[in-house]
Image: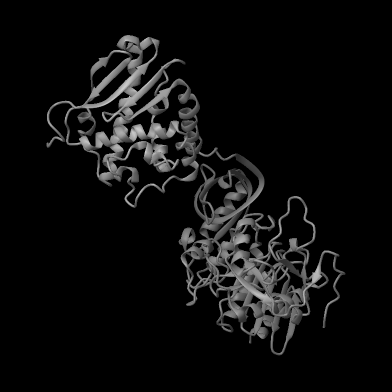
Amino acid sequence: MTYEFPATEACESVLDTPDELLYRQITKHKWNEVARLPSSTAFGPADADKGKPSFARAGADGVTEQTSRDWHQQNARTPSLGVWATTVGEVQGADLRTVEDANCPLAPDQVRAPGHCFVDYRELTKSQVRTARAELLLRAIARGELPTNDCLADDNGDADQTNTDQEAEHSGGAAAESEPEGPFGSS
Amino acid sequence: MPDDDNDERPEYSAFTLRGDRFAGGRLPIDALVELERYRAILLAAAERAWRRAHPGEPLPEDFASEFDLAITEVRDGSATSVLERPASAYGEYFDSGRDETERLFQEIIAGLALPALDAGGDETRDLDGDAVVDQLPDDVAIEQVASPRRSSFSRDDLVAYASLPELRDLGASLQADETAEIANPSGEQVEISFASRITMIRPFVERVEELTAPPPRPERTHRQKDSIAGRLIALNPEKRNYTVRTLLFGEVSGRYKEASLFDDLRDVLNSNANAPVIRIVGRMAWVGDKLDRILEAKQVELLEVPGESWSRRIVELASLPPNWDEESQTGEVISFTALEAARELLRAAQELQDSAPGIFPLEDGGVHLEWTVPTRVTSVEISPEDQPEFVVHSFTLEPRAATEVTTTNISEATSALTEALG
């Protein structure tokens, strides 16, 4: 099944490069520190996205997992904890489409990441969104986190110091310890 | 104590004041303050030289007293004060301080120091923190060293020197047509004119003052209806105040006016709950982005947090402030009802699934639970209402299929979840 999508704008184009990676930045509220996995919501739209969650195309000039993360760190309010990816083909496999909009005009106060594109969730019901984002999450997990500086896990799956600091405030998962720690360590 | 040379007082430095007031070797009493300032800068520079050579050691008690400068001669032509110092074990540091002082003024007046404040300026120091210029052969003139047109001082050094009142005020008594000149025995000299003090020294000092000024005091604001979560750790009914230990802001004190609030707070303290967390809704005072005081509590909510593997995460979500999502600058505080329901579901799923569930906040104040294995994602969205709605969703890759159950009955939600995970 393929969903009905709205017509694209003149400045937009639907991508048909199945193997092209689409980078997604994972932030603290969508990261399960214990399982060291993103939430499925990381691959779907937040309310503010209006059905168009942002990704960065690996095929765009100068765009790599590292440069896309660097751009995010410099421009977004919430730091990226790591870069995970799906592909244009996997998006198609989830009955969605990837729309490249790098040439669309921006409002004066807006900035756009290099290689910007979005996965089109606009006409989906909430239930369909849950299904599609879950599928993209599983595809991304099969690929694993893309290594970048300040990445979440090294080859052994251990957190490096920088990310441990970043994640200290909100860790996302059920902690291994049985008692709360830190300021809440005693009642 | 060994001396650095013989017992005679070698000429150490010359401080010359030029202008009509000083003609014929006249040294007005008013101008002596400039000599005092110069001496203070020399001593500070000598102390810095000693500390670089003896990191971590206290300055010898007699260091300042050994720096016993004396005016031995006021030469004709202008008021040239010939300064001598007695031989001292610290002689090399006194000389180093003198040379560094001279170089400092050269660089300030040449316009090298000001850019170094913003650029860092550490490149010309070696790993021990010594200025590279100090290690050059004696026959290399200061002008040659300064020729790359960058300061030889580190930013920290420049800030330290600029913080000396004597450096800031050196030459302040000079009039428009007067200059001060400092020179060492080898003939190197620096001239500080009325103009260079205005155009070079003062901007340098003012820039340092800008850089080192304390940040502006955060604005104090009151919010009429705010909320904060934390553990109630103290309650004083006589003063009608209490203290809450919060995850985000440490211990915060507050007051209440209504007697019924005391009953709620006392019930929390007396409850059998293990590690209870409360959320207080009321009027709060903030200093910048830090909660300062709870001015008046109007409502108290209790969240029991037994010691379970997910307890810390539950408390983290309970502690999220309004607009917790920095990216969208939205995000309702997480509903305690949703958190309690989440805990029930987590307990039910504990026996069925080894993988650590993700526990995430939802923008509407609800809670999102998620269990992920390589071929399946199972999630529960819990809405924030007092009677929460549960959406249990499960997606499998092979066969590619999804199921979803929506209910307001937690038992039904639990059954749907256990079936999906089973």
The one nearer the camera, B80 or A124, is B80
Instruction: Name the residue rendered at 14%, 33% in the picture.
Output: B5
The one nearer the camera, B237 or A29, is A29
The one nearer the camera, B276 or B370, is B370
**Which quadrant would residue A5 be assigned to in this image?**
bottom right
Instruction: Name the residue rendered at 68%, 55% in the picture.
Output: B329
A94 left or right, relative to B120: right
The x and y percentages for residue B163 are 41, 33
Rendered-image quadrant of the C terminus of chain B: bottom right
Instruction: Name the residue rendered at 69%, 75% in the picture.
Output: B410
A130 left or right, relative to B230: right
**Which quadrant would residue B194 be assigned to in this image?**
top left
The x and y percentages for residue B393 are 71, 78
- Image vertical order of residue B259 relative to residue A181, above or below: above
Residue found at the far right of this picture: A7
- Image vertical order of residue A107 relative to residue A4, above or below: above
The number of numbered badges drawn on the structure is 0
- Image vertical order of residue A140 relative to residue B59, above or below: below
Rendered-image quadrant of the N terminus of chain B: top left
The x and y percentages for residue A170 are 56, 63
B230 left or right, relative to A53: left
In the rendered image, is residue A13 in sight?
A: yes
The x and y percentages for residue A179 are 47, 68
